[in-house]
Image (cartoon, grey):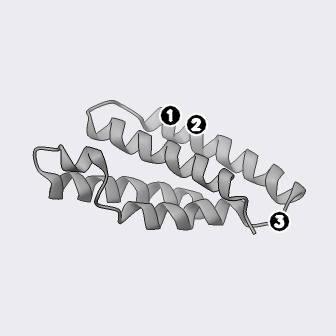
């Protein structure tokens, strides 16, 4: 079973990047770097602990993508559109990890 703190750390990082992207920042380079870091770290964690860390983060990102009570969404001009963009961002990252 994947370490919960590991999963939470990476999900929080990607959720933060989603918020930055919504605010207009260019985050693609940071996303690619964080995905690379995650893959390397997951390989280490799988070897030292139990396997499945990368898959656990990917699955949790899909769950996180459906959260709609995030502060950034409540304060957006169009919360529904912001929620759809956030979901698309996190789903895309989850798919990158699953590939």
Q: Which mark is residue 90?
A: none
Question: Can the viewer see residue 99?
Answer: no
Mark pair 2, 1: CA separation: 5 Å
Of the numbered discs 2 and 3, the one sitting upstream in the chain is 2
Looking at this rendering, what residue extends furthest in the right direction?
Answer: 48
Residue at left offset 66%, top offset 47%: 38
Q: Which mark is residue 30?
A: 1
Residue at left offset 16%, top offset 53%: 79
Name the image quarter holding residue 77.
top left
Q: Are marks 2 and 1 in contact (CB under 8 Å)?
A: yes
Which residue corresponds to mark 2?
33
Q: Quadrant of the C terminus?
A: bottom right
Q: Is residue 74 left or right of residue 5?
A: left
Q: Name the spot of residue 64 as percent of width and height, x first.
A: 43, 61
Q: Quadrant of the N terminus?
A: bottom right
Q: Secondary structure at mark 2?
A: helix
Q: Which mark is residue 50?
A: 3
Residue at left offset 16%, top offset 44%: 76
């Amino acid at each position: 079973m994947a370490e919960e703190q590991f999963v939470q750390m990476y999900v929080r990082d990607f959720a933060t990047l989603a918020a930055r992207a919504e605010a207009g920042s260019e985050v693609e380079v940071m996303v690619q770097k964080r995905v690379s870091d995650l893959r390397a770290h997951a390989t280490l964690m799988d070897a030292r602990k139990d396997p499945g860390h990368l898959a656990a983060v990917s699955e949790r990102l899909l769950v996180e993508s459906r959260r709609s009570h995030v502060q950034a969404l409540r304060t957006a001009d169009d919360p529904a559109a912001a929620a759809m963009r956030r979901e698309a961002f996190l789903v895309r990252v989850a798919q990158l990890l699953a590939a």
